[in-house]
Structures are given as structure tokens and as C-alpha cells.
Amino acid sequence: MIECAAMNVGFRCFCAFAAMLLSIQSAKSRPLDDVVASGTLRIIAYADNRPFSWEGSAGEPRGIDVDLGRAIAQKLGVKAEIVLRMQGEQVDDDLRANVWKGPLTGGGVGDIMMHVPTDKDFVNRNREAVIGNAYFEERVAVAVDSDRLTNVTSFDIFKTQPIAVQLGTVADYFLLTYDDGALINNVHHYVRPPEGAERFLEKETIALMGVRSQIEGLLYEKRAKTTILEPPMPGIARSRWVVGMAVSEQSRDLRDAVGNALNDLRKTGQLQKIFAAYGVSYFPPPKN
């Protein structure tokens, strides 16, 4: 009886140790040969980043980054495993959890992470990850009700007309500080992007300001036709930035293979078609 109990304890310890090993293995980054040998490319995308990635009504991953990840996996001759994860407090935290260390709650890292900023300062302070393969330039823009407003040459027009913007964003700060706060009474805040789109379409505001891809994607889903403008934004902290992908520092050959696949998708027009399927204008990263 004692011997059986000891055997059970030993078996449980062995299982726990094996599970720990599997967890450690799953948390490791993989070079290209390991990815190809496994037949699967593990892709991390954000769980709430419409139109780039989100969970569909049936629980399936959807979005531009999801389709792009699958297209890249196909080019590499493997299947795509899409993992959606929530954003952390900072993108640096997301890189640590998704690229080189793994989340505190378990689950391991991915082979590549989508929608990562590529600006120089961010890259320099995250040496454990290799950031590159830029594929899109995000832009701040303004959607206007073309029945009531045909053009915006200056934000002075919003001294008398209402404009909607997401709370706590770069666009919000710009509007609130424009001309020493001259627009404050006409800035309508929303927390969730779909809310802002609804208020704009219901004509509560004459314009909607924010990230262009997000605005275009939301309005496309609602089959709304509107005018998107990029008027001069004097003093805005940032009106454009480039996003790319990240891999672990130990996976540089995978980075190169993904880059080749991305170039093929761009040359054949498949990359542009992925964006168009979600109603988003494709803006390539500027050439250095």
C-alpha cells in the first residue's frame, strides 16, 4: 500500500515535470527550420484591434493582421496558428510576453507578433526582439459628413461645428489644445470606437477624427460612404507611424523568410487586396 502510494506520488511528480518541460519548450522562440519542421507558424495578434485583429462572433480570429499572417504562413509552406491576446499597459510589455519571455499566465511566445511599432527609439530599447518587416503606415485622419461639410482646410471650422474623437488619444490631445483650447466645447468624446462611428453616422457630429484605418474599417462594416481627409494638423504629436512585425533575437532567419514572403505578397498585389477586403486604404511604409 505504501509502495503504491509512493509510485503514485512519483508518477504525479513525473507528469508535473514533463508539463513544466513542455511549457518551457513552448515558451522558446524558434528559428526557421523548427517552424518548417513543425508545420505551424504561431502568430500573435491583438484581441481588440479592429480592423486588424479581433475575435469574430463565432470565436474565430478575424482582421487584416490575421489574413496577412495566414498568407505569410502559406508562403512558408506551413499552417498558421493565430493567437489573440489583449494589449498590455505598454507595447514593450507585449513584446516581452509575446516574443521573448512569455506571459505570466502561461501560454508561451509566438513565432511572430503583428502590428508592432517600428520607430527607432522603440526598437532600440527592445533589444531582445528583432523588429522589422514594416507593412503599413498608420495615419491620423478626419471623416466628414459630406452632406454638410465638403472640405477641411483648417480646424478652425470646429470652433462652431461638433467633432468626435476617442478619449485619451493623440487626436484628442491635438483637438483639445488646438488654438489654446478654442475647440473644447465642440469636441465630443467616446471611449469605444464603434460608439464614435455610431454618433457620427447619426449626425450627432459633423466629423470623426482618429486613426484612418480604424475609421475606414468601422464605416465600411456599416456600409457607410463618407469622405476621409488628412488636413494640416499643426502641432500634433504624431500624425503618421509605421507598423511591422517582431520575432525573437534568436529567430533572425525566420524574420528574413517572413520578409521575403511579405515582399512577394506586396508585388503580386495580395497584400493590398487584404486591406481592401476590410475597406481600408493601403499606405505602404515610406522608403528610407
Image: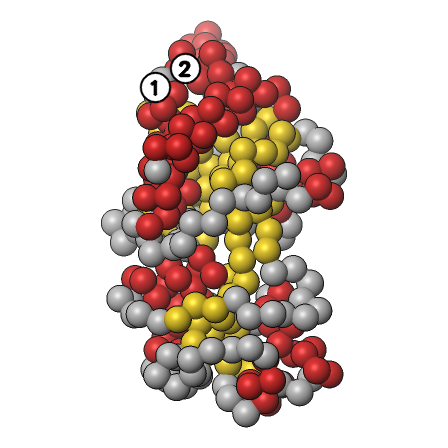
Q: Which colour scheme is used?
A: secondary structure
Q: Do the residues labelled 2 and 1 touch (CB within 8 Å)?
A: yes
**Residue 134 appears in view:** yes
Q: Residue drawn at (47%, 13%), measured in percent from left and top?
A: 34
Q: Which of marks 2 and 1 is nearer the N terminus?
A: 2
What quarter of the picture does the N terminus occupy?
top left
Quick one: label 1, few (<14), some, or many (20+) residues within 10 Å?
A: some
Q: Residue drawn at (39%, 86%), measured in percent from left and top?
A: 148
Q: What distance separates the C-alpha of mark 2 from that of mark 1?
A: 7 Å
Is 133 situated above or below 25?
A: below
Q: What residue type is labelled 2?
A: Val
Farthest residue toward the bottom?
160
Mark count: 2
Mark 1 highlights which residue? 77
Is 16 situated above or below 37?
A: below
Rendered location of residue 246, percent (x, y) = 56, 33
- Dot 1 falls on a residue whose secondary structure is loop
Report the front residue among 250 and 271: 271
Is 159 situated above or below 133?
A: below
**Residue 2 appears in view:** no
What quarter of the picture does the C terminus occupy?
top right
In the drawing, what numbered circle is on residue 36?
Answer: 2
Q: Which amino acid does label 1 sit on?
A: Gly
Is 259 situated above or below 98?
A: above
Report the front residue among 178 and 2: 178
